[in-house]
Each structure stands twice: as structure tokens, then as C-alpha cells.
Amino acid sequence: MIFLFILAISAMAEEPREPEDKSADIYRSYCVSCHGENVEKIPLNPESTAEQRIVAVSLGVSSMPPYNWMLGDEEVKRVIKFMEQLQANGRIEDPQAP
């Protein structure tokens, strides 16, 4: 009986998990057709600031549509970070991969 109590307490004490990062999936689904597998077709503007990139993804820019209807602020930031890493590394690396 004590063992079950301790087991139940330890299960409840697990640390909360981070929300799943779906940046790679979002990029593959919505961005790769224009930006390319490795952000080679339409690269990120090296002179743009983080805030400008957030606005561009959220509200759209030029022929790029807005994504604020489906992505929250944190998701937009994670997708941008994913794209920056992808452009720097030259390949898709899934942030959820082991």
C-alpha cells in the first residue's frame, strides 16, 4: 500500500513538459514550397531584425500570405528560429528528433 502511494506521488511530481515544437512540420507544410528545402529559394533577409521577421510571418509581406490566423506568437518565433538554423546549417533538422 505504501509502495502504491509513493508511486502515485512520484508520478504527480513529474516536471511539466514543454509544448511540442512543431516548427519542422510547419515549415515543411507551409514554407518549403516557396522558400525551398534549405531556405535556398527565398532566403531570409540578413538585414532584417527578429521583430521584422515576426511581423513578416504574422502579417505577410510581398507575395507571402499572413500566418497569424494559424500560428501564435511563440510558434512564429520558433518557426523563424528553425528557418535561421536551417539556413545556417543547410539542412532540415527536426527539433524533436532524438
Image (spheres, helix red, strand yellow):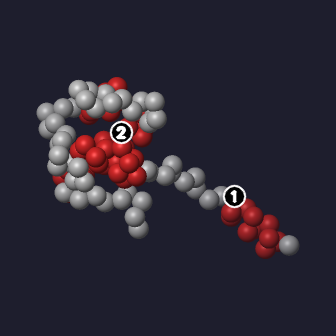
Q: Which residue is mark 1?
A: 12
Q: Residue furthest left?
A: 47
Quarter of the image where one finds residue 89: bottom left
Residue 38 vertical placement versus 9 (above, below): above
| Percent coordinates x, y for residue 52 in the rendering | 25, 28
| Percent coordinates x, y for residue 63 in the rendering | 25, 29
Name the residue at 38% across, 38% down: 76
Q: Secondary structure at mark 1?
A: helix
| Percent coordinates x, y for residue 23 in the rendering | 38, 49
Q: Nearer the viewer, residue 60 or 20?
A: 60
Task: Say which quadrant the C terminus sits in.
Answer: bottom left
Task: Say which quadrant the N terminus sits in.
Answer: bottom right
Q: Secondary structure at mark 2?
A: helix
Badge 2, how many Cα within 10 Å: few under 14, some, many 20+? some
Residue 52 vertical placement versus 22 (above, below): above
Q: Which residue is mark 2?
A: 77
Residue 25 vertical placement versus 62 (above, below): below
Name the residue at 45% across, 30% down: 69
Which label sits on residue 65?
A: none
Kind of residue indicated by mark 1:
Met
| Percent coordinates x, y for residue 97 in the rendering | 40, 64
Side of 38 relative to 94 (left or right): left
Q: Disc 1 or disc 2, which is closer to the eye?
A: 2
Residue 30 vertical placement versus 25 (above, below): above
Q: Is residue 51 visible?
A: no
Distance Cα–Cα, label 1 vs label 2:
31 Å
Kind of residue indicated by mark 2:
Lys
Name the residue at 36% across, 39% down: 77
Q: Is residue 42 visible?
A: yes
